[in-house]
Image (spheres, helix red, strand yellow):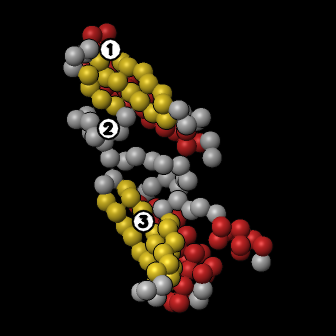
Amino acid sequence: MKEDKKILLEKHKDIARIDQEVKRTHGWYVRVRFYGKTYSKFFSDRKCGGRYSSLLSALAWRDKTEIKLGKVRTDKHIVTVSNSKTGVVGVRHNEKLNRYEVSWVTTEGKQGKTSVSINKHGKKKAFELACSIRKKKEAERLATD
């Protein structure tokens, strides 16, 4: 029974507790975001047989949904939508300095940055190198769970 309490008290990525007395709504709300799309589901305590059972159902649904989508199962934050014109998360083109700039979060949670010169490598090769660096750094961060 101690394990049950521990699971209830832990924070779970993408899962929020909803307790609205006025609406008599109690349960867990799961929201999985992947490549700009959101998948969500509510797990009612009443329908699932209690607070603990609804949490277990929510966790199972989240994990199953991530597997189905091809999302890496981790409790770390993952960005899958790029705000830059390159279309690659963490890689941006700096026209003024004629380079691709790469950014990532280190295993210690700090900002990491580097750049790849277009003058030195050519535009296509510089972009490929920048993407390769970003992919490697993201894999390193996610490997340390």
Q: Residue at x 41, y 86 (%)?
A: 23
Of the pair 142 and 105, the residue shown nearer to us: 105
Element under disc 1 = strand
Q: Are marks 3 and 2 in contact (CB under 8 Å)?
A: no
- Disc 3 target residue: 31
- Whether tag 3 and tag 1 are in contact, CB under 8 A, the answer is no
**Mark 2: amino acid:** Val
Q: Quadrant of residue 50?
A: bottom right
119 sits to left or right of 138: left
Q: Secondary structure at mark 2?
A: loop
* Label 3 – label 1 distance at C-alpha: 39 Å
- Can you tell which of label 3 and label 2 is closer to the viewer? 3
Instruction: Please state the horizontal and vertical placement of residue 94, each as a whole percent of the image.
Output: 26, 22
Q: Earlier in the sequence, mark 2 or mark 1?
A: 2
Q: Quadrant of residue 113?
A: top left
Considering every residue shown, the one lying at the far front of the view is 22
* In front of the other: 122 or 73: 73
Q: Where is residue 138 shown, x and y percent of the image? A: 49, 37
- Quadrant in the picture for residue 131: top left
* Mark 2 → mark 1, Cα distance in angstroms: 17 Å
Picture quarter with the N terminus: bottom right
In the rendered structure, which amino acid carries the disc numbered 3? Arg
Q: Gap in Å between the C-alphas at discs 3 and 2? A: 23 Å
Q: Earlier in the sequence, mark 3 or mark 1?
A: 3
Decide if residue 73 is in sight here: yes
Residue type at mark 1 is Ser
Residue to which mark 2 is pinned: 88
Q: Please tell me whether mark 3 or mark 1 is closer to you in this view.
A: 3
Which residue is identified by label 1? 117
Residue 68 appears anywhere in the view: no
